[in-house]
Amino acid sequence: MLKRCPKCGIPVKIGRLMVWGKGGTMNTRAEPHIRMAIFHADVHESTVREIENTLGKPDKDLMYLAEKNVSKSFFMGLPDRVPGFEVLSRTTKFKQKLLEEIRKYAQLMGYGHVEIIDYDPGVGGTIRIKNPFNLDLVAAAVSGVFEFMEGKAFKCEWEKEGDGYYLVKTRVMEYAPLSTEQLPVETFTGLPGEGNLLLCKGCNAPLILGENFDWDEKEGVIKEKRTGRRYIILSTFSLGRVFDELSREYGESVYDILVKAQRDWMYNHIEAIGLSMDEPRDSEGFQTFFMDYLGVFPVFGYGNPVSFDSDGDIIEITVEDPCNIYMMAGIIQGLYESLSQVPATVRWEEDGGVIKYTVAPG
Ligand SMILES: [Zn+2]
């Protein structure tokens, strides 16, 4: 077990690795241009299922390649941060240590329990994963790590080993296909914001995390206490990239599907935590409730909800720097529908990093 914060109970490493800004964002402390967020673990799968229902089975290779490239690009700042990286990175000992650090990181972020079965520098390795949050994406991330460490293209195969257990084998490829080209790292700057999130004095992570989540970094599982639902911490670049890749193949409707999947998830989530209303609340109660809930956005790194206006049943919510415009649209729509029990539509206007969402019955 990692060291726990005596004040809030979560692993102290979370507050060391991540930093929460005033703009409703969460970034890695080591490389502040890399933006992170806490997503429900079904965020990809729920959308993929919806794509399957409407457009047909999506090409998982596309998602695999996108995630592999994102995983690789995640480490691109490492050579600048580690003195002597060029020389060190050629040694087996360094690579083994790096792999071990990444294994622990993956567990802390909630990706599942990870074991390194074997590793042969320059050739490949075998990883056992128990309860991956998403097998395709975890396998892709593992390949990305190997490609970064070895500077070569890797292919990856995985098989089921037992109940909840999978073996992921990565092996070097003789010829690198074009699709494994290195992606540039997406640099996030963001608006300054004026949020004042309550941070734990013991570990610098938002206090609300310890109140609401159980962290099992050995099993690689983060669970919401109230619902038992699983969550992960992921780079927002990763989430966006996977869906951008799918939209290039299946068209813009992928984004509508992303909105709908998140709307459905949010609707069910509010039902699950027992907050939906059988009868509509008065408008003041509705607004208070809505904004209280949106208060969780900065904790999750989703952006800064800065205003709420309503005109009858129509509401307008402004969010600065939403971590993913479509996902937040779905969440806001789902929240509206579950709290009012009225079917609604959501649309938005974008102005720089400021998004004005309008939700109306219909
Ligand atoms: Zn703490």
Image (tube, rainbow, N blue to C red):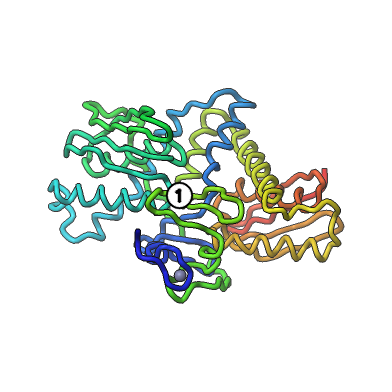
Q: Picture coordinates of residue 41 (x, y %)?
A: 52, 45
Q: Picture coordinates of residue 142 (x, y %)?
A: 33, 40
Going 66% across and 66% down the picture, which residue do you hit?
Answer: 306
Q: Picture coordinates of residue 8 (x, y %)?
A: 48, 69
Find ligand 1 in the image and state its quadrant.
bottom left
Going 42% across and 38% down the picture, which residue do you hit?
Answer: 137
Q: Picture coordinates of residue 53 (x, y %)?
A: 63, 26
Task: Determine whether the beta carbon of the residue marked 1 sits less than 8 angstroms from the nearest atom of ligand 1.
Answer: no
* SS under mark 1: strand
Going 58% across and 55% down the picture, which residue do you hit?
Answer: 322
The crowd level at tag 1 (other Cα within 10 Å; few <14, some 14-19, many 20+) is many
* 113 sits left or right of 361 in the view: left
For disc 1, the marked residue is 221
Instruction: Give the amino acid at mark 1.
Output: Val
Query: In terms of depth relative to the viewer, which is nearer, 126 or 56?
Result: 126
Q: In the displayed image of the protein, which residue is found farthest to the top?
A: 56
Q: Quadrant of residue 283?
A: bottom right
